[in-house]
Image (tube, helix red, strand yellow):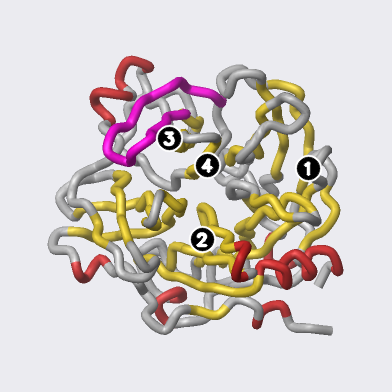
């Protein structure tokens, strides 16, 4: 049996974004990656020492390794979120999906006194201007991830309800919408299925392949020394994404290197998305390490799909 833990290789430049390089910054972690023209864009979760919460920044790169991180927040909390009484200083852990020429951004955050986290939907076409669309999920629902195209005339997304406030066994659900705002037809899709995700799991934006929708997921186990966050994958049917047709029983990536096992939160590798390079049969996985810094791992896209199909 092939060891799927060898498919992804960590980049030798890791960590590719380190808060030690930015005065006054405590954390830069959990990036959401997309291709934007000839650039790779990361929406980065960041936190300053001088402020109690987190913010989203834009990081840009031509080669996907050397990034320039903007020093201002991309999502302006006061001007965009306040009208909905959702006032929270943590605008982090975004998921970005390109549909046609628009980049849709899903951001989990809480309404003070109303429970949380819920999820807001916004959009951009240039990663300079952010437009709020609406609040599209009730608490507890974070990690919502959009499919990059309609399926049978509907928009689809993966939800992660529950798993908040100490609730364990957070599963992944599916829902659909005619307009990206009104959602329904909720269906359970993935529940914890292996030792590395037995506590809870969560999705990232699905990647279309000939074999099915590849979804990179995080999974949480809870050994004696505290939670461990690892990365794996599931495969969903192209025409009926409610059907899971494959999964990795082993991890693709687990906390192993010092920059993953030691940080603000120890023992964490956390994805918010990945970029496929179909012509090279490569997947570029940008991930947060120890809720502190940002790293890159790359490997064969087809081998990850095969690992899901074979349940390796």
Earlier in the chain: of badge 2 and badge 3, it is: 3
Camera-nearest label, 4 or 2: 4
| Local secondary structure at mark 3 | strand
In percent of the image, x 72 and y 35: which residue is there?
A: 174
10 Å crowding of disc 1: few (<14), some (14-19), many (20+): some
Alpha-carbon span between mark 1 and mark 4: 20 Å
Please provide percent x and percent y for residue 160.
Answer: 63, 40
Camera-nearest label, 3 or 1: 1
Q: Which residue is mark 3?
A: 109
Where on the picture, by quarter, is residue 171?
top right
Q: Which residue is mark 4?
A: 97
Q: Main secondary structure of the magenta part?
A: strand
| Local secondary structure at mark 1 | strand
Earlier in the chain: of badge 1 and badge 4, it is: 4
Alpha-carbon span between mark 2 and mark 1: 21 Å
| Local secondary structure at mark 2 | strand
């Amino acid at each position: 049996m092939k060891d799927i833990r060898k498919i992804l290789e960590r980049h030798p430049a890791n960590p590719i974004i380190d808060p030690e390089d930015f005065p006054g910054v405590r954390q830069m972690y959990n990036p959401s990656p997309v291709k934007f023209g000839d650039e790779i864009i990361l929406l980065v979760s960041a936190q300053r020492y001088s402020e109690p919460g987190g913010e989203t920044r834009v990081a840009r790169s031509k080669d996907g390794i050397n990034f320039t991180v903007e020093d201002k927040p991309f999502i302006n909390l006061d001007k965009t979120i306040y009208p909905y009484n959702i006032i929270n200083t943590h605008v982090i852990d975004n998921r970005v999906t390109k549909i046609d020429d628009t980049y849709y951004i899903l951001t989990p955050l809480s309404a003070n006194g109303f429970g949380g986290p819920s999820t807001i939907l916004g959009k951009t076409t240039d990663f300079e201007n952010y437009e709020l669309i609406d609040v599209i999920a009730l608490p507890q629902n974070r990690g919502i991830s959009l499919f990059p195209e309609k399926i049978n005339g509907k928009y689809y997304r993966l939800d992660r309800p529950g798993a908040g406030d100490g609730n364990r066994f957070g599963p992944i659900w599916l829902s659909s919408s005619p307009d990206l705002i009104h959602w329904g037809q909720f269906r359970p899709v993935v529940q914890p299925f292996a030792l590395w995700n037995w506590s809870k799991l969560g999705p990232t934006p699905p990647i279309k392949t000939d074999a099915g929708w590849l979804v990179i997921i995080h999974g949480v186990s809870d050994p004696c020394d505290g939670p461990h966050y690892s990365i794996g994958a599931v495969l969903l049917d192209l025409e009926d994404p409610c059907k899971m047709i494959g999964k990795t029983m082993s991890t693709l990536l687990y906390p192993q290197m010092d920059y993953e096992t030691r940080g603000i939160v120890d023992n964490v590798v956390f994805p918010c998305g990945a970029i496929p390079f179909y012509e090279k049969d490569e997947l570029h996985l940008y991930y947060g390490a120890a809720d502190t810094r940002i790293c890159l791992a790359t490997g064969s896209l087809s081998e990850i799909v095969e690992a899901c199909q074979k349940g390796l």
